[in-house]
Every structure is written in structure tokens, then in C-alpha cells.
Image (spheres, rainbow, N blue to C red):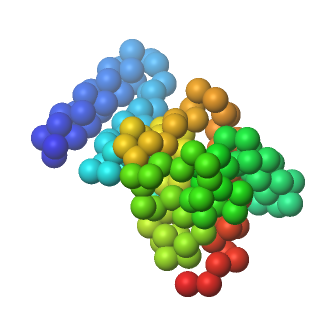
Amino acid sequence: MVVRAIGTLGVVLAAAVMDVAAGQPPQPAAKPAAQASPSGWQLPPDAAETKNPLTIDPKVLATGKAVFKDKCQKCHGPGGRGDGPDADPDADNMDLTLAKRAERNPDGVIFYKIWNGRRKPKMPAQKGELTKEQVSAVVAHVQSLRKTTAP
């Protein structure tokens, strides 16, 4: 893994040097690819540090709640407690209101879980269904559900 990262860095640096030598501005390095975690989530290495780009206000929360109702409620339930009619019986962690989960699931992690989904337990990927702004609004809504829940 380290050898591959060093090799990739070397290629990026060599390309930048060649661009400068040819009078071309250097190109930004590509964002690291998402990696599968043992639980099946596809998360980029910086997911935990990624902040929601939206300014959270009542309009964003209302948008997030509406998208949640359309795309997420059938599994996660109307209050996000994992009690929707299509909830996966193999999943034991569908309750989005648990305050103790907030630390493990900051904005960027929630975003990529929604965006990329996973196979088992099932969580449909929304990258073909929603815009990044809509997913970010859902993240804001989900985070608001946790804030109202006691630890």
C-alpha cells in the first residue's frame, strides 16, 4: 500500500515537472479513490474530515427532509429509527437517531454512505438518483435527527 502510494506520488510529481518544463500549468492531483471498508462501505480516505458544503438553514433542512421522505424513509422510517416497511432484517444499525453513532458518522462519512451505498446489508447508492447538493441536504437532515436524541 505504501509502495503504491509512493509510486503514485512519483508519477504525479514527474507529470507536474514535465508540465512545468513544457510551459503547462501543473494539473491538480486526483482525489484518492474510495476504498471498501470491511463493512462494505466505499469511503474515500478523507471522508471523516469532509464537511458539509451547505450552510445549514431551515430551507436546507426542509429540502433534506423532503428528499429523505422520498428516498430513505421506506427503509429508515419516518423518524429515521430504522423501522420503515422495507428495512433490511439483516441490518442492526439502521437507526439514524442514535447520538452515539454521530462520532463514527460525521458529515463526509454519511455523504459517501448515501452516495455509494453498499450491497449487504442493503443500502441503495444514490449517486445516480440524487445530486450532491441533495445528498448534502439529507446529511444535514440526518444530523438534525441525532441532535434531538439523548445519548
Q: Measured along the vertical axis of the image, is residue 66 above or below residue 116? A: below
For image coordinates 62% across by 84% down, the residue present is 150
* Picture quadrant of residue 12: top left
Q: Position of residue 17 (x, y in %)?
A: 32, 27
Q: Judge left or right: residue 77 versus residue 34.
A: right
Give the residue at x 44% y 28%: 26
Q: Residue pushed farthest top?
A: 22
**Place of residue 83 in the rendered image (x, y in percent of width and height, measured from the top left):** 59, 59
Left or right, 105 with respect to 73, comes to left
In the image shown, does 149 or 35 lie closer to the viewer? Answer: 149
Q: At which x and y percent is residue 71?
A: 67, 41
Image coordinates of residue 84 in percent, x first then y, are: 62, 53
**In the orientation shown, which residue stands out farthest toward the bottom?**
151
Pick the quarter of the image with the N terminus.
top left
Of 144 and 34, the residue lying toward us: 144
The answer, for residue 49, to whether it is visible in the render is no
Quadrant placement of the C terminus: bottom right
Q: Which of the two residues, 26 or 91, is positioned nearer the viewer here?
A: 91
Residue 87 seen from this side = yes
Q: Residue at x 44, y 42 (%)?
A: 122
- Label tally: 0
| Rendered residue at 51%/58% (across/down) | 94
In-front residue for pair 26/37? 37
Image check: 32 left or right of 137? left
- Please determine whether, in this image, residue 149 is positioned above or below residue 17: below
